């Protein structure tokens, strides 16, 4: 239901050194988490089983051209080929052990900054890899919540890499699961992972969006558009229509759905048309009680948040940024199609449209 299985590696217990005197060496097991493309998420347990583990993941950096709208292209810089990069799921006090691979077919240096980590510029200083190199980073997930990760190679290249798609999210669940403000368990049956991406595509003298032969070819002109702070496109999961129409998300009446919303560069204003945020962690901080019964909420720039809603009626729901200009004119919208029986007590059309008497 949440993607592929988190696969345990049959290595038994591993003894390793965690930045402390040798006497404090501990035994800890390793598991391998298979990452999946958004909007799917890795299979996981909502409550941790056993003591903290080392969760091993592997991400391959891919530079590739993508079509973000009809006849509009950008050379995306991606983690594992998707925009956003895949969601990582661990529990508080687990260790994330990432192998980051930059194939020789790529053209530039990359790294990764985890907002969930502590020290070394979020790991960015320890993960710089040139084409043809790989690096392994391990950090302890000490804070529970949903956090952004992104490439941060330095200087103007930081925002340029981020707005070319090189960002994603990690969810660090409390070991005993999510709780409401009274300490009661909150459980979900599905998770949808949405990455909101702002793009800045230059136009030629005829008003047509430019297309470049290589990623770096558009660098100077793209920076000029970026300086205006006016995106040409704001989309969910990499392109206009990625989560609408035939690509709409699916649920059933009675499903309790978590929606993870990540925005690495700008503020966003999620709203579920026809529903609500039963529980909302606007800034993703699972250690604090969630807000409840919200009509819309705010995802801060450079952060991720989570909301939970139990669907009560069938039909088409729109999940969008309630800056409606961004949603309807620039592309920041998704659809959720819900199957089930209609409840007239919640809503009923008393009369159909007819001429005014």
Image (tube, rainbow, N blue to C red):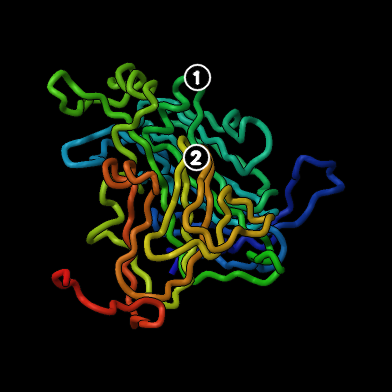
Which label sits in the foreground, 2 or 1?
A: 1
Q: Residues within 10 Å of mark 2 (few under 14, many from 20)?
A: many
Residue 217: x, y in percent?
28, 20
Residue identifier under label 1: 155
Q: Can residue 56 be seen in this view?
A: no
Q: Which residue is drawn at 36% across and 76% down?
A: 347
The dot on residue 100 is: 2
- Identify whether 218 is placed above or below 327: above
Does residue 194 lie above or below 1 as drawn? above
Q: Residue 271 carries which label?
A: none
Q: Identify whether 167 is placed above or below 253.
A: above
Please name the residue shown 53% across and 29% down the image. Answer: 128
Q: Which of 321 and 246 is in front in this view?
A: 321
Identify which residue, 246 or 106, lies in the foreground: 246
Measured as percent of width and height from the top left, residue 97 is found at 59, 47
Image spot of residue 207 (x, y percent): 16, 25
Taking the spot 66% from the left edge, 49% from the top edge, the residue there is 141
Query: Which sits earlier in the primary sequence, circle 2 or circle 1?
Result: 2
One can see residue 314 in this view: yes
Most extreme residue toward the right is 23
Left or right of residue 51, residue 316 in this image: left
Q: In 3D space, how far apart are the residues under numbered discs 2 and 1 (Cα atoms)?
A: 21 Å
Place residue 268 in its image quadrant.
Answer: top left
Please tell me how crowded label 1 is: few (under 14), some (14-19), or many (20+) other residues with Cα within 10 Å: few
Q: Which residue is more in the foreground, 287 or 81?
A: 287
The residue positioned 24% from the left and 78% from the top of the image is: 351
Q: What SS does tag 1 mark?
A: loop
Q: Where is residue 357 in the image (x, y as percent from the top left)?
A: 16, 72
Q: Is residue 85 above or below residue 230?
A: below
Total residue callouts: 2
Instruction: Identify the element where label 2 is drawn.
Output: strand
């Amino acid at each position: 239901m949440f993607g592929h299985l988190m696969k345990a590696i049959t290595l038994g217990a591993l003894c390793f050194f965690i930045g402390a005197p040798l006497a404090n060496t501990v035994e800890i097991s390793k598991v391998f988490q298979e990452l999946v493309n958004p909007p799917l998420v890795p299979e996981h347990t909502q409550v941790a089983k056993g003591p903290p583990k080392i969760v091993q993941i592997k991400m391959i950096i891919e530079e590739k051209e993508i079509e973000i709208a009809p006849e509009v292209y950008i050379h995306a810089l991606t983690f594992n080929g998707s925009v956003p990069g895949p969601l990582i799921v661990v529990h508080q006090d687990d260790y994330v052990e990432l192998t980051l691979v930059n194939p020789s077919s790529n053209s530039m240096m990359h790294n990764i900054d985890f907002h969930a980590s502590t020290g070394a510029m979020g790991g960015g200083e320890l993960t710089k890899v040139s084409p043809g190199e790989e690096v392994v980073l391990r950090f302890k997930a000490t804070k529970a919540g949903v956090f952004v990760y992104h490439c941060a190679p330095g200087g103007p290249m930081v925002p340029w890499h981020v707005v070319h798609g090189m960002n994603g999210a990690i969810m660090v669940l409390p070991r005993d699961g999510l709780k409401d403000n009274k300490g009661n368990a909150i459980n979900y049956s599905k998770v949808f992972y949405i990455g909101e991406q702002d793009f800045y595509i230059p136009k030629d003298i005829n008003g047509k969006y430019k297309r470049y032969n290589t990623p770096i070819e558009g660098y100077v002109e793209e920076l000029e558009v970026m300086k205006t702070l006016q995106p040409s496109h704001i989309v969910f999961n990499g392109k206009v229509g990625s989560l609408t129409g035939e690509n709409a998300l699916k649920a059933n009446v009675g499903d309790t759905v978590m929606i993870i919303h990540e925005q690495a560069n700008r503020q966003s204003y999620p709203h579920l048309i026809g529903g609500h945020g039963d529980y909302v962690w606007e800034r993703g901080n699972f250690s604090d009680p969630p807000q409840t019964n919200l009509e819309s909420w705010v995802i801060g720039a450079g952060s991720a948040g989570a909301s939970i809603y139990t669907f009560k009626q069938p039909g088409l729901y729109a999940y969008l940024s309630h800056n409606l200009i961004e949603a309807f004119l620039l592309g920041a919208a998704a659809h959720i199609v819900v199957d089930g029986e209609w409840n007239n007590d919640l809503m009923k059309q008393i009369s159909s449209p007819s001429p005014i008497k």
